[in-house]
Image: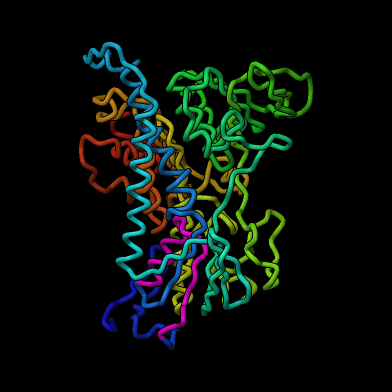
Amino acid sequence: MSSLILRRFWAVKNTTPITISSLRRLSTGQDETDLVVIGSGPGGYVAAIKAAQLGLKTICVEKSPTLGGTCLNVGCIPSKALLNNSHFYHMAKADFEHRGIDVNGVKLNLGNMMKQKETAVTQLTSGIAGLFKKNKVEHLVGHGSITSPNEVTVTKEDGSKEIVKTKNIIIATGSEPTSFPGLEFDEKTVISSTGALSLESVPPRMVVIGAGVIGLELGSVWSRLGSQVTAVEFLSHVGGLGIDGEVAKTIQRILKKQGLDFKLKTKVTSAVKTSSGIQVTIEPAAGGKQSQLECDVLLVCVGRRPYTTNLGLESVNIELDEKGRVPVNKTFQTSVPSIYAIGDCIHGPMLAHKAEDEGIICVENMLGGAGHLDYNCVPSVIYTHPEVGWVGKTEEQLKEEGIEYNVGKFPFAANSRAKTNADVDGFVKVLSDKKTDRMLGAHIIGSVAGELINEAVLALEYGASAEDVARVCHAHPTCAEAFREACLMAYCGKAINF
């Protein structure tokens, strides 16, 4: 164990390796717990595993019967299964014939599609249980509440309580969907993202409140399966906050061609259940004449809020900020030195991969490390088809900050792999500093944008220039060559194949 080296995490710039033997082992007795993690989502389970790997006696408390949190159970994972399979269905119905594949009588079996989704969820959640066993992380099922700086009380389903004494606590309780005022979720006709993952039939008409990441993804699923989907968005663009303006306009145009309807700069003022469905009243965001939309299912995607219900924060004098988040310092430590917080319940984007990184860095810092996370290098992805991925600065942000920049843009219509795949919607856009050529941001619309964006993340993390990427040999034919060509255009003004 003493020879095992704790390598620097992705964002850490340490020059001297930290060995396990040099770290402060917290527990001094067999019955003492070093760390209790409340929540087993991506941040919580990763933090628990990392802590155990570094020699800490670790307990993870989860109120749900399965591990994985929102992401694995009713979020990222099941939604991607439905996105993938609904895309296959759409291809079979509308695209296969153009590829020389004649398929007659294509029918949707929604029940089997849901079963495949559940299979993926079960395999991954049980996989976490296996990882806990492998790494000797103890799993307690119940609602965890902090009852002192070094104590967590776990209330189990039968009402019994178990008190755990611990040296440190990590709050990793995630977030929950925000409801529409005056209309509670029944997850049948008025649904959150959770209900949208388990509808028993395809609704003829669906209205989505919010055309951000979740609204676009789930709206796409049900549109492909046959629903008439209308997305109502308060902002002037789709994709939510942080998306590049040109990218937002492009993906909206593509999705509109696929059948989604959008009402931008529009707000929902009320929604009332009627004998024929739900009547949704809308009006311009700036005010004006009202109108009505009729739907069978109303999907509310107006955001998420930190989940801090009955955590006992008041018992240790931890006050939430104005958005209901747990305030932390740069090492994810709260105002109570023994209590830390990560993921959706603190500042920053509510993303699973952000929470995972915070979990690892938090544990390493707890043991004397010096890790940090560069939030400018945390990517975002919308898993529609085509996908949208971005990292770093947008053109709008650079203009606002007064930073001069170059733009390198390359369309997938000029990329050989995209051509052979007959899947050419989208482009790669790279933004680099006009003086230094350092890459400042990357924005991709394309069938594999979620994969390609990681090359841009790596470039930003290590301070690469556009020329650095342009001079790296990329395999041919691949969609990744479009990223190289965009970098080539950013640094010298000309691509080779466009």
| Quadrant location, the C terminus | top left
In this rendering, is residue 255 above or below 409? above
Residue 299 in which image quadrant: top right
Q: Which residue is drawn at 46% across and 38% down?
A: 382
Instruction: Give the percent coordinates (x, y) of residue 421.
Output: 26, 26
Can you tell which quarter of the image residue 206 is in? top right
Residue nearest the observer in this picture, 381 or 160 = 160
Residue 160 appears anywhere in the view: yes
**Residue 227 belongs to magenta span:** no
Residue 117 image point, x, y percent: 37, 37
Q: Where is residue 140 shown, x and y percent of the image?
A: 46, 65
Residue 46 lies in magenta, yes or no? Answer: yes
Write down the region rendered in magenta: 30-52
Residue sitting nearer the eye, 180 or 116: 116
Query: Could you tell me if residue 244 is visible in this image?
Result: no
Residue 190, quarter of the rendered image: top right
Q: Which residue is drawn at 37% across and 54% down?
A: 458
Q: Position of residue 24 (x, y in %)?
A: 43, 84
Residue sitting at x 46%, y 59%: 40
